[in-house]
Image: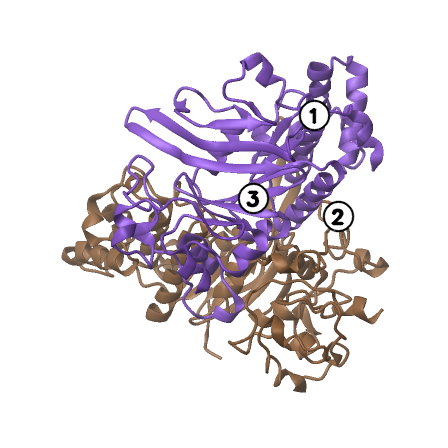
Chain colours: A purple, B brown
Amino acid sequence: MSTATDTTTSGHTYTPKDGVLLEVDDLFVEFHTRDGVATAINGVSFELRQGESLAILGESGSGKSVTAQAIMGILDMPPAVIPQGHIRYCGEDLLTMPEEQRRKTRGPEISMIFQDALSSLNPVFPVGWQIAEMFRVHRGMNKSDALEQAVRLMERVQIPAARDRVKAYPHQFSGGMRQRIMIAMAIALDPAVLIADEPTTALDVTVQAQIMALLEELQEERQMGLILITHDLGVVADVADRIAVMYSGRLVEKAEVLDLYASPGHPYTRGLLESIPRLDQKGQTLAAIGGLPPNLMNIPPGCPFNPRCRMAQDICRTDRPALREVAPGRLSACHFAEEVIDA
Amino acid sequence: MPEVVLSANNLVKHYPIKKGVLRRTVGHVKAVDGVSFDLHKGETLGIVGESGCGKSTLGRLLMRLEEPTAGTVQFEGQDWSGASARETRRLRRNIQIVFQDPYTSLNPRMTVGDIIGEPLEIHPDVVPKGGRRQRVQELLDLVGLNPEHINRYPHQFSGGQRQRIGIARGIALNPKVLICDEPVSALDVSVQAQVVNLMEKLQDELGLAYVFIAHDLSVVRHISDRVGVMYLGRMAELGEEDEVYSRPTHPYTQALLSAVPVPDPTLRGKREQIVLVGDVPSPANPPSGCRFHTRCWKAQDVCSQEEPQLEMRQDGAGGHLSACHFAEPRLVVETVDVSDLVPDERFVSSSTDDLDDVGSGLGHDDSLAPDDRSTVERSSVSDPQAPADTSRVVQDTDDQQR
């Protein structure tokens, strides 16, 4: 179990200030396409503390993956443009950092696990070689030492017969095992922040349970800040400390996990929770949210959720609600947040 | 019980594995290996299982998109698998299918009117030629789309709307059975609920019977009357929805249910998850005896030698079909934490009497009285006031007894 700690050297280049690792401040991301400008992220702010699990919850097109890619600095620019905003890692703005310096943060400081392990791994290199690459490039290790570390990491993420399989290729592994290899690569350099973008969406439930258990264990062991990006309310309830709910590029609610599930503070969150089939509603109509998420090139004025909202009033169609504190530790971007919480 | 519309009898589908220059058959992928069940008029049979368990192949066999290697499919008592081409076409009017992926199952070059109208072209006697356009517009209206959009193309619709188009095509011929192969898996949560609602509405209005194939256990529970759990081409457990979910007797079903994440953070750390080791074995070379024995914590010698049959086995409150030598009920689905409660004697006794009081007097966490009865009563589905959610995992009764 403790072998993996040997793979890391203690201490990062950066030290968090007051426990805050990552701070995203009023971030905007636009995609300039032939058809027009799509605003994928529209003023998002949040912070991540040491050892904390923050879940970013949202449906497809809500901007949750783009947020992760902006933090990692792996957006294709162009077409993506970041017209304003800051992403600070331990106080340093990643967006203004020279690329050479930023490259050194990817891996040792911030790393990421992707949804689709098969297309994220290189099919023509053995998995051990790919894991070892982290040590060769960032730590300057020689081939055999780096491979030795790769074996230890593979053991750490519970790949059976790791030493025999270190030279196997990605296609020789099952979906769950590939995701373990992705995790091994992501934690190789003992990052302070781990971003997991839908890490279990492509997996079956029994395998999903294995992978989530592993992630939790690793986070506990290394006190990483974890950003879990998902659309699955069940996974969030199991893992997250805090939740940020995104809708059409905006944060609509931010709360502690227990508060949010007990009494959601935004009609969208409430709608999502009510959309899950529940035992006491069997045979009844599910409380679905009507309509569809807006087109990002044409976000409605006022609250972006107003066309689908059951509580919408005139003010919702004209005034955009700001994300404000509606109760201690709870933020909601709804004009009627207090009523939603009490409902 | 209503009449049987569709029945599968010992259905088998093996795909040959070919190798070498001569393409010799070196083995078989046993996708479906002896599955039997009856589907009654107007009911929903849910089929759950992980990827590779053969649930989609089963759907295609029922539809006769694949010829079974062995076994038969009967529609209203008539054997469908040996029918002539003309007979097959006639019978197919009664069985239609909705596919998983709304992006690839609609022809991008056809308008919505052509897509939904195509079954009417193939079966011209259902609606006279002059009335087809009107019928398509009725169908669009029925599935909640704007009838004026009849001339649009699939790419002009969102995923949820496309799935509605697929459903409209499926019900165009007034079938009696609709096979739904993962119809909501590709959709977002909020849209998924809309489509599930639509399917329930259509079932009520048209008296359809559904075979609902999915991997999402909570959706299947919501929509199904009966549920079958598949593992490596075989049915592991089959029963009424509440039998399978509240009194599962097959270890695989128990593990599957316990692995489902529950959208309730208050249960964190209080649920007992059965985390299975390893992956599903290859269907080309399934384990001997019980196919689950390689991952099962209960496995004994007999499990690797003798294949357990799918038969009635005690579930603590009657019995339902299960294929495990050591079938015994285990409470894995719960809404509240009952880990420190005493187990209910119902799991020890095999009498069926106590079913009657199941679900009585139980509400939410505050009603969590530390007496014995409330332990299992909460797992019931017979009381609509009862548990707030579908899949909760608690300490199983065995552990509590220890």
Looking at the rendered structure, the kind of residue marked 1 is Val
Marks 3/2: CA distance? 27 Å
Q: Position of residue B252 (x, y in %)?
A: 69, 58
Residue displayed at 63% across by 48% down: A239
Mark 3 surroundings: few (<14), some (14-19) or many (≥20) residues within 10 A:
many
Do residues under tags 2 and 1 come within 8 Å of each other at their CB atoms?
A: no
Name above or below for residue B347 compared with residue B158.
Answer: below
- Identity of the amino acid at label 3? Ala
* Element carrying mark 2: loop
* Residue B117 can be seen in this image: yes
Image coordinates for residue A263, horizontal then vertical, percent: 50, 60
Badge 1: few (under 14), some or many (20 or more) residues near its Cα, within 10 Å?
Answer: many
- In the image, is A186 to the left or to the right of B193? right
Which of labels 3 and 2 is toward the front? 3
Residue A127, which numbered label? 1
Chain ID for label 1? A
Q: In this view, does B150 lie above or below B83?
A: above
Among all residues in the image, which is located at the extreme left? Answer: B130
- Numbered badge on residue A55: 3
Q: Where is residue A339 in the image (x, y as percent from the top left)?
A: 40, 61
The residue tagged 2 is B277
CA separation in Å, label 1 and label 3? 29 Å
Quadrant for the N terminus of chain A in the image = top right
The Cα atoms of the two marked residues, 2 and 1, are separated by 22 Å
Percent position of residue B320, x then y: 64, 73
A29 versus B80 height, above or below: above
Q: Which residue is drawn at 51% across and 76% down?
A: B384
Residue A174 picture quarter: top right
Q: Which subunit holds the residue at mark 2?
A: B
Residue at disc 1, secondary structure: helix
Nearest the viewer among A312 and A86 is A86
Q: Can residue B72 be seen in this view?
A: no
